[in-house]
Image (spheres, rainbow, N blue to C red):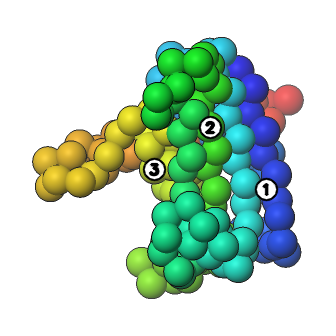
Amino acid sequence: MRVEVSRQATKSRVVSTAEVRAASEAMLRVLKLPRAELSVLLCDDATIHALNRDYRKKNKPTDVLAFAMREGDDGHLAGDLLGDVIISLETATRQARERGVASRDEVMMLLAHGLLHLLGWDHQTDADDQRMRAETDRMLAVIRRAAAAKAKRAAAG
């Protein structure tokens, strides 16, 4: 699998690119997508605002955007290329504060949410929303287990 993680216009260090890459790879393994290609951009509100305005016609920042390559008329040509997940670290930090969770945990939730959108998950109905939340929680459990295993390996040796 290939996961590219980059930063643009953000000085926030609530999460490292290495953590995001490792979390993405753990989720892709559990989703049985060993050859998948994924791009993740960690950015600021201004960057995501411009993307949200230009591509979704919503003139405001948002927390996460997902641009799926497997959608549309030519989606069948994407092969293993899933697409792009863009996360605003500024919005994630604000939302984390409002929800009383760690900023890193909020970013990981947005990463899981965005990845599921790339795979066709949606939350247009209450039932869809409930299923997507459950799958997001499952992906977060995968991330926690992977991080715990890494910490155990580091402590052992």
Q: Where the C terminus falls, by quadrant? A: top right
Residue depicted at 17% across the width and 53% down the height: 125
Q: In front: mark 3 or mark 2? A: 2
User: Element at badge 3?
Assistant: helix
Q: Label 3 to label 2, Cα distance in Å?
A: 13 Å
Q: In front: mark 2 or mark 1? A: 2
Residue depicted at 49% across the width and 70% down the height: 57
- Image coordinates of residue 41 in percent, x first then y, are 73, 54
Residue 16 numbered mark, or none: 1
Asked if residue 126 lies left or right of residue 150, the reply is: left
Residue ID for mark 2: 83
Decide if residue 149 is in sight here.
no
Q: Residues within 10 Å of mark 2 (few under 14, many from 20)?
A: many
Q: Amino acid at mark 2?
A: Gly
Q: Do residues under tags 2 and 1 come within 8 Å of each other at their CB atoms?
A: no
- Image coordinates of residue 146 in percent, x first then y, are 61, 34
Q: In the rendered structure, which disc, 1 or 3, sits on the residue that comes first in sequence?
A: 1
Asked if residue 22 lies left or right of residue 29, the reply is: right
User: Closer to the camera, 47 or 6?
Assistant: 47
Decide if residue 123 is in sight here.
yes
User: Closer to the camera, 25 or 39?
Assistant: 39
Q: Amino acid at mark 1?
A: Ser
- Image coordinates of residue 17 in percent, x first then y, are 79, 51
Q: Amino acid at mark 3?
A: His
User: Element at badge 2?
Assistant: strand
Residue depicted at 53% across the width and 81% down the height: 60
Residue 113 numbered mark, or none: 3
Q: Do residues under tags 1 and 3 come within 8 Å of each other at their CB atoms?
A: no
- Image coordinates of residue 102 in percent, x first then y, are 56, 70
